[in-house]
Image (spheres, helix red, strand yellow):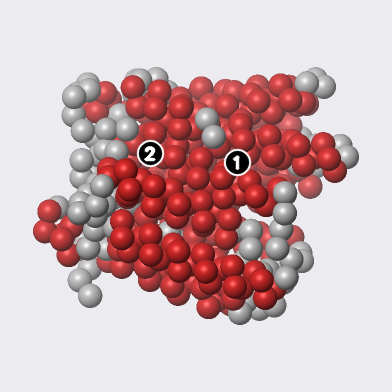
Amino acid sequence: MKIKQFNTKNLSTGFLYFYIHFVTETICFFVLAHYTESAPVLWLLTFAFDVLAFTPQGLFGYISDKHKKVSFGAAGLVLLGCALLLQRFTTWTFVSLVVMCIGNAFTHVNGAEVTLRTANGSLSHSAIFVSGGSFGIVTGKLLAAAGAPYWLVLLLAATAIPFAILAQMYLRDDAASPEAVPCRAFQFHNPKINKYLVILLSVIVVIVRGFMAYGIPISWKKTTLQTVILFTFMGVGKAMGGVLADLFGVKKVALASISIALPFLLFGNEHMFVSLTGVMFFSMTMSVTLAVLVSVMPKTPGLAFGLTTIGLFLGAAPVFFFRITSLTANCIMLSALTAACLACMFISIRKDERHEQLV
């Protein structure tokens, strides 16, 4: 198997936004963990968070595409700090939630803009950026459980602002040439099929993957340490997906990772490291679907990223209303949805050999 030369140009944008994404999710889940209302209110708050944080990212991404000089990342971190203060010193629960969700969306779309526009067709930059969220989720929960003071989390938000400003500097050259196609090096979609069908198939994969994540049997997860390890493997898997796709080819990694993941997911219900191996491979497909969407939307990478977050919400939304509790039913569902994902990716992704000839 041919190993391609790894592109390290502007890779620092991925690490800058790894930290910003980490801080973003730490703040959000620190705040969410402090809500102690009744179960129906908690259900409503969690559902509202998913709606308000995920679905507007398509719109914000489109706006960010048109206004590249605006640092949405720094603005988002300021809003997250405001949400912390509102939650701590007022009783305006939903106001705090809305401000937090807008801040969350701002940092996400800016991270996508920066890492995609500066990657020159590489997946590693955005994959590293996205992986930071998994570590932030568990950190936020742990800080809340430990009774960490609000000023400490607010300080964390402040430390990320210089990172956002520095990351924005990488977009200056791109902003100076508005007619350029920033993501023209992303050529991973199958040119033989209609681009709108590619978009549809890619979003379907995101929706299915989002729903599958809640059906993974993990009865072994009973302690805080096991939760930390689970989210660590998720984060590592997301980053690895981009790196390995750059080295070995997008289509190879996409099809191999989800195929390899399935047996580990099915038989890992009571075996932690078997399950974790499946979770890691399952998480690797994240960067691929984003790259394929950007391939057919090279002028609007922010909007392309926003479509993936809308897809994640649509995949997660049914879980708020029903869950499959039977292990057998979960395994059947995982197998059927994996087959659907494989079919969609096989159709929509260009052969790796053809892409290598074009780069």
Q: Secondary structure at mark 1?
A: helix
- Residue at image mark 2: 304
Q: Residue at x 27, y 63 (%)?
A: 249
Q: Residue at x 73, y 70 (%)?
A: 326
258 vs 155, nearest the viewer = 258
Label drawn at residue 136: none
Q: Which residue is mark 1?
A: 25
Q: CA distance from mark 1 to mark 2?
A: 21 Å
Furthest-left residue in this view? 357
Residue 40 coordinates in the image, percent (x, y): 83, 40
Q: Quadrant of residue 91?
A: top right
- Is residue 18 found left or right of 297 in the rendered image? right
Numbered disc in front, either 1 or 2: 2
| Relative image position of residue 119 (x, y in whole percent) | 28, 44
Task: Give the residue type at disc 2.
Answer: Ala
Question: Can you give x and y, in whole percent of width and height, for residue 144 in the image?
Answer: 76, 43
> Which is more toward the observer, 270 or 15?
270
Q: Is residue 258 visible?
A: yes
